[in-house]
Amino acid sequence: MRVCVFDDRFAEQLEPLTLTRPAFDLYCGLTPLLDKHARRFGATDLGLLVKPALADLARRDHPFRPVNDLFWLHAAPTILVNGRWLPPSGLADLPLSPHVGMVGGQVAYAVLPPHLLTYCSPNTVDDCLETWRATLPPQPAGGNMIDYPWQLVEQNAAQIEADFPWRTCSLDHGYFHPTSLTIVGPEDSLSVHPTAQIDPEVVADTRLGPVVIDREAQVQSFSRLIGPCYIGPRTIVSGAKVRGSTIGPVCRIAGEIEASILQGHANKQHEGYLGHSYLGSWVNMGAGTQTADLRLDYHPIRVRVGDVEVETASRKVGSFIGDHTKVGLGCLLDAGSVVGAFAVLLAGPGLLPRYVPSFCMAVRGEVLTNDGLAGHMSTAAEVMRRRDWVFTPVHEGVYRSAHEATAGIRNALLRQRANLRMRRTG
């Protein structure tokens, strides 16, 4: 099956996570969304359609996929899949005639002949979606559309369970259980890669869902993994309590993590609580950092998305933190906090501001711009080097584009602070 996964304009609602990656690269369950799209349609030829600022990064992260290749896209009948769609489990059984798969009023996928793809490109895909929705017969697509970042967190535990049978069926080694690991619950709900290192005094609790420990992961003594739970490749778990969470590749974690997703290469190596949150890549959480995820009055939590506050209808919502953000020692993050990419948070009296834009900093409870781009790039290169990762011109290009895209927010912040000073002195 020929499949092309695209980002639409509503992927911006998933920022700061989609500021530096396509929506289909976000984790939910054991895999990013892209893997679920490919599995749903049995993709044998998979292409990608992303906004131009992310094209080089997509080519680097998916080297064998055509990215923004319009010659490939227009060459044959293709299923276009929305990167924000969280599809149902199992293989799709679709009519071959042109139609759109709908979730609510949104297009989850479209089955298209070449002549309907003629004008489709990264810059026109949203207009094409409107045309296809108005002219092609609809079919219920099932699954869910991910409109906001907290929805990935809410769906994560169920997705770990849904992904688990696919994982165990595809592994040659099946279920591997190290003798050093204590299992509480069904043994067939545990999957450990043979290359993983499990110390004595580690507990995997599978009574509420599967526990998966991926290749070359290290789980050190006195860790407790409570399913549904996923520990990604080369991640180090240092005496942590992890439940209902997805920990991506090459992370270092300790303390308590509940119902959260770490995209990968994140550092939460000290004591502290992280709950109902999503951390981007290369985020560093300082020792003693705590994230609230529940209001004292138990009311549903509101989260800022763009310029507006959005009602989540959920009582448990933590923090959403963009790539390369540094959270200092002892920081206290309120429920429903949004922190952009390349931000710096320093502890102050009480809770930090609930919204800190990209390339800004929170100091003594006040949000300030932190616009030294050369310094940000230098720090990012050093952080990645320390994890044996190469900071490439592709990374720098993406980060510079993110800096440019968020300049308006920082300029508005400067104007707001200037007006406040004038009122105080007037």
Image (cartoon, helix red, strand yellow):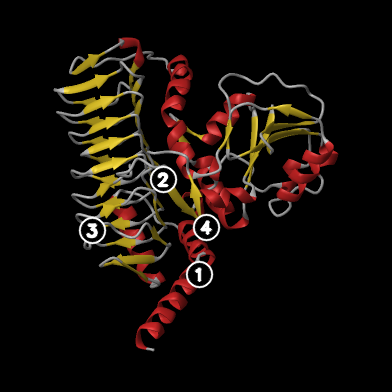
> Which label was assigned to residue 350?
3
Of the two numbered discs 1 and 2 on the same chain, state the one appearing first in sequence: 2
Q: Amino acid at mark 3?
A: Gly
Q: Dot 1: few (<14), some (14–19), or many (≥20) neighbours within 10 Å?
A: some
- 88 displayed left or right of 137: left
Residue on which the image places disc 4: 306
Q: Are marks 1 and 3 in contact (CB under 8 Å)?
A: no
Residue on which the image places disc 1: 407
Q: CA distance from mark 4 to mark 2?
A: 16 Å
The single residue placed furthest to the front in the displayed view is 297
Of the two numbered discs 3 and 4 on the same chain, state the one appearing first in sequence: 4
Q: Quadrant of residue 168?
A: top left
Q: Dot 4: few (<14), some (14–19), or many (≥20) neighbours within 10 Å?
A: some
Q: Amino acid at mark 4?
A: Gly
Which is in the foreground here, disc 1 or disc 4? 4
Which is in the foreground here, disc 1 or disc 3? 3
